[in-house]
Image (cartoon, coloured by chain):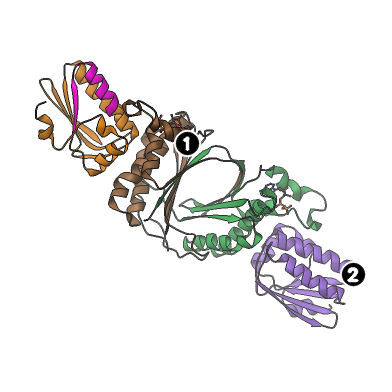
Chain colours: A brown, B green, C orange, D purple
Amino acid sequence: MRSLVSDPGGGSLAPCGEWTIASDIGEIDRVVLAVTTLCEAAGFPPKVCRLNVPVALTEAIANAIERGNGGDAARSVHVSARIDDAGLCVEVTDEGTGFDIHSARALSEADGWVEREDGRGVFLMYALMDSVESSCNAGHTIRLVLRRS
Amino acid sequence: MRSLVSDPGGGSLAPCGEWTIASDIGEIDRVVLAVTTLCEAAGFPPKVCRLNVPVALTEAIANAIERGNGGDAARSVHVSARIDDAGLCVEVTDEGTGFDIHSARALSEADGWVEREDGRGVFLMYALMDSVESSCNAGHTIRLVLRRS
Amino acid sequence: MSFAIERDDDLLTVAVDGQLVVGNRQELKQLVLDEVEQGAKRVLIDFSNGGYIDSSGLGALVSLNKRIREQGGELRLAGLNEDLRTLFELTRLDTLFHLYGTRSDALVGF
Amino acid sequence: MSFAIERDDDLLTVAVDGQLVVGNRQELKQLVLDEVEQGAKRVLIDFSNGGYIDSSGLGALVSLNKRIREQGGELRLAGLNEDLRTLFELTRLDTLFHLYGTRSDALVGF
Ligand SMILES: Nc1ncnc2c1ncn2[C@@H]1O[C@H](COP(=O)(O)OP(=O)(O)O)[C@@H](O)[C@H]1O
Ligand SMILES: Nc1ncnc2c1ncn2[C@@H]1O[C@H](COP(=O)(O)OP(=O)(O)O)[C@@H](O)[C@H]1O
């Protein structure tokens, strides 16, 4: 269960969740279900919860596992979801080096795209979401952990 | 206000928050207050909420701003906090290239450390937290946004 | 997420229960291709209990369609709800597949 | 987060209200050094209404201590609660500063 707290910092707290999964296709569904449930609880329209969110997120995680991490189970995928007044923002991070998302989107403009078995994932993310952004990470993180006891 | 939802995905949801701030010392307090309030709500001991968490987090964010980002206000610092059954985990990410945290911690072993004006931040993080880790980021992130309307 | 199959002479009917996605599309492909190898020519996939389909699921249908045609057979899809129709329209797969309303609609002239 | 100052001849008393941290330690330093320049020799900083102190705040106290001594004065700290004492012990600053219980304790023999 989540705890109910008000935000003393001026509006930054929001329903959210984070998951780190191994690069295993079987792990996708539970994360997708969790994010979809967050969206339902936050009052997103039913069609969005049934179609847009689960499909776009499945695409992003599947690509992270298969493309970004090359299916290497030792590499992990991190998903963070956050809902605020503006909407849902989900980030899917893999351990890869990124790719040219604009070319991937433009696959749909090539002859024969409709008959292809693959090449619809990025296209669908754009079609189902309001914004899709791809970036390579850099920087430094310090992680502080405090145990409860 | 946070929403109250149960976790359909099997235990990964937890009270959490994320903040992205400019490299401005004046931004530190509100994030520290928000995280401290999360810890209070989650039942951490009073001394930990009054001392360990705010001081260690202030150090981490101040270093991210002044050292990692060199005080460049155009660069941002990202803070994410998450509390689960095991405890609190906070990550502070700057846009820098990292540093040798073990040497920074060992400053306290040098002669004259007590009389120095600086060089106590990393030491205090280790003294006040159960675990401190520094890592350089790599990888690729895809961000999906869905507006509410 | 499961598939229920019925076989009647050269007609194979598969009812999809739940999502058709990257995690189970291989299972569907294998199951249908096995039946095709054993003589199924008319393949009807019924989505009336189906959930969402992702790009891998759509890809599996495209691939099955091709393989079944190569064997001289035909694939028909039925029972797609409005969500799924949206997905087929977005990806223009409604130009590749004829989408039938109900299972019995799909059987007319099959 | 604020500082209240009282000046009585060469005695400066500063009451810290709230945290002493990277965001306000410069203000405290400036305020005290201005008074020292104007003749304050005995400086008493009272933390009885203080919150936490970070490494920058501790550094500001170390630096003030040095500057005040250089001017022939003395810095005393009073009213540190148990949290703050922990901090001074962890950083061994309890060897550099004498920590007084109350403000009046600090005034004895000052
Ligand atoms: N996370 C990722 N990391 C690296 N490359 C990716 C990633 N996601 C997508 N791609 C690239 O974009 C291409 C198109 O992706 P997509 O539209 O999902 O189609 P598919 O995965 O079916 O080929 C992929 O073939 C791959 O080259
Ligand atoms: N986020 C960071 N990025 C780069 N360098 C850092 C970072 N945090 C700390 N450092 C390095 O570690 C040293 C020690 O840090 P710290 O113990 O906080 O003392 P101070 O910041 O007071 O010098 C800093 O001087 C700096 O060189």
Host chain of mark 2: D
Q: Residue B122, image x and y in percent?
A: 68, 51
Give the structural element (helix, strand or loop) at label 2. loop
Q: Which residue is nearer to you in this view: A129 or D44?
A: A129
Front position among marks 1 and 2? 1
Question: Callout 1: 10 Å neighbours few (<14), some, many (20+)?
Answer: few
Tell me, yes or no, if residue C27 can be seen here. Answer: no
Residue depicted at x 34% and y 43%: A54
Residue depicted at x 54% and y 37%: B139
**Mark linked to residue D67:** none
Residue position marked by numbered label 1 in the rendering: A102
Q: Residue D1, image x and y in percent?
A: 65, 71
Question: Callout 2: 10 Å neighbours few (<14), some, many (20+)?
Answer: few
Residue position marked by numbered label 2 in the rendering: D71
The stretch in magenta equals: C61-78
- Labels 1, 2: one chain: no
Q: Of the residues shown, which amino acid type is indicated by label 1? A: His
Dividing the picture into quarters, in which one does residue C68 lie? top left
Q: Which residue is nearer to you in this view: D94 or A87?
A: A87
Residue depicted at x 27% and y 41%: C86
Tell me, yes or no, if residue B119 can be seen here. Answer: yes
Q: Residue C11, image x and y in percent?
A: 13, 23
Q: Residue C51, image x and y in percent?
A: 25, 40
In the rendered structure, does residue C77 fall within the stretch colored magenta? Answer: yes
Host chain of mark 1: A
Q: Is residue C105 above or below residue A112?
A: below
Q: Which residue is nearer to you in this view: D105 or C82?
A: C82
Q: In this view, does A131 lie above or below A77?
A: below
Q: Of the residues shown, which amino acid type is indicated by label 2? A: Gln
Dividing the picture into quarters, in which one does residue D2 lie? bottom right
